[in-house]
Each structure stands twice: as structure tokens, then as C-alpha cells.
Amino acid sequence: MITTGTRRIREPRITLVGAGPGDPELITMKGANALKDADVILYDALVNEAVLEYAAKDVVKVYVGKRSGEHSYSQEAVNQLMVDYALNYGHVVRLKGGDPFVFGRGYEELNFAASYSIPAQVIPGLSSSISVPGLQQIPVTHRGLSESFWVVTGTTASGAISNDLYEAARTRATVVVLMGLNKLKDIVKLYQQEHKNRLPVAVIQNGSTENEKLAIGIVDTIVELVEEKNIKAPAILVFGEVVSLHPQFQPIKDFFAAVKEVD
């Protein structure tokens, strides 16, 4: 405990907490307890603000979200804020959507805290890459359909499609694409080039929340379905035979079966 003027603050420390996919009840108990103990919370755009209700009423809450069209903080600025608040307030919780280590740049923040000799710990969260399909009864692996899964970012820092997607499209694995909705047409072309026109695809917006939207189709139809349903970011893309297990895919199965009989 340190006394500064009339205010007593605790020793600085930082906790990286994964908030999960969106539903505030899907944060871990350990994550919720960290929020209760926090002096300051720095939270991202993908964090459902209802999660902040786990925190004490007098906690300092700082929005450092990054979204297109909004004021955003650079990663360097977020790193510095995190350290400055820890030194001046005590316990800082860095709250991130999903899991801090799945495209969350969590290790960069952990490393930055270490450069100031500030103790830090990580509390994992449910990654949307697994939990959001799961909530839709889409397993990322299933015996006979998929023996592995890839989790790939849709867009790199340069704005280009990730090179890993070219490789992923050639495999039989389930491929979950995060931050890739604006590249959907380009990703679809990759699968069409691999002659996977009928591969099942799911696009899920705001997974696990009351604003969730879902489009279920195949590679050749998914772009049109997403436009019809007016699906926007944030959304995840799931390419793979496991999507055929979703109840909404049954009519598509029936259609293909009828076409095959006619042929």
C-alpha cells in the first residue's frame, strides 16, 4: 500500500482478462472476481459493457476501443495507459473481448508491463472462435467430418488477406475466420478456386448476444445470404463440413439430394 497525499493506493499490478464472446454470463468466475477487485478497467470495443457490472461502483472505467470510424487508441497508447494507471491507482484490469491471446495482442501488453517490472497475470476467456459456433450447435471438430480446425484472421495489418487463408482453404479442416467479414467475397473466391463451391459456411454476427444474426449456406451462396440478412461486423466466418450439422442446413441437404436423384 502506498500513500499519495490523502489517497492510499495499492501496489501496481495488471491483470489481462478475457471477457468471452459477448454474453456477460460467459466470463469466467476468476475474470469476474478480478473485475470486482480492480481499481481501473481498460476495456475494448468488443467487450459487452454489461460485463462491467461485475466491477465495484467506484472503479475507474476507461474505454480504449478500436473500431472503424471511431476515435481509437494506438496499441502503444493503450500500453502506456495501462502502466500509468497501475502506477497511480494500483490494480488495473485490461479487459479484452474473447481471449487475450487470440488476436488480442495480449502478450504485447504483458511484455510491456514486464518492462516496468509491474507484476501481471492472465485470466483466459472463451474465444469466440470456438464458443460462438458451439452455441450454434456447430462443433469445430467432429468425427468423420473434421479432425482439426484453423483460426485465422481475415485481414492482416496491411489490409490484405492473411496468407494462411490460402493454405487453410486447401485443407479439410474447419476454418474459423475472425475479423474477416469485409473480405468475405475474396475468401469465397479462394474456396471456389479449390472447387469447394458446396462447402457449408456459417456467418455469425454478435455471437452469444441478444443481437445475434446467423446466415447458413454454402460457399456459392453465402455472400448473397449475408447481404439479404444485413449481417455486419463483428462477425465470425466458419467454413467446413461441420456447419452441415446445424439444423438450418437440413433444407440445403435435402435440395442437393433431390438434385442428385434427378441427375
Image: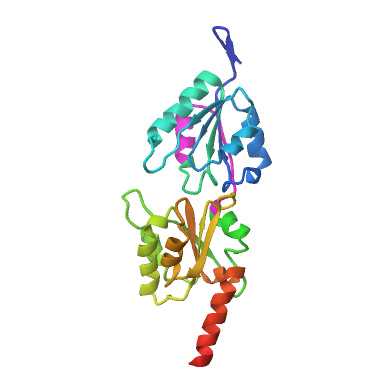
Q: Can you tell which quarter of the image residue 226 is in? A: bottom left
Q: What's the image's color scheme?
A: rainbow
Q: Considering only vertical position in the picture, is 106 above or below 259?
A: above
Task: Verify whether residue 115 appears in magenta.
Answer: yes
Residue at the (53%, 55%) spot, across then down: 129
* Front residue of 168 and 112: 168
Residue at the (40%, 61%) spot, across then down: 184
* Front residue of 159 and 247: 247
* Whole-percent x, y for residue 39 in the image: 58, 24
The magenta stretch is 107-128
Q: Considering only vertical position in the picture, is 254 above or below 247?
A: below
* Whole-percent x, y for residue 127 in the image: 56, 50
Q: Tell me if 102 is positioned left or right of 194 in this view.
A: right
* Whole-percent x, y for residue 1 in the image: 61, 16
Task: Verify whether residue 113 appears in magenta.
Answer: yes
Residue at the (62%, 72%) spot, across then down: 143
Q: Is residue 145 visible?
A: no
* Whole-percent x, y for residue 137 in the image: 63, 63
Q: Can you tell which quarter of the image residue 75 is in? A: top left
Residue at the (64%, 46%) spot, across then down: 26
Q: Is residue 65 visible?
A: yes
* Front residue of 51 and 97: 51
Q: Tell me if 258 is positioned left or right of 194 in this view.
A: right
Residue projecting furthest to the top: 5
Q: Considering only vertical position in the picture, is 106 above or below 227?
A: above
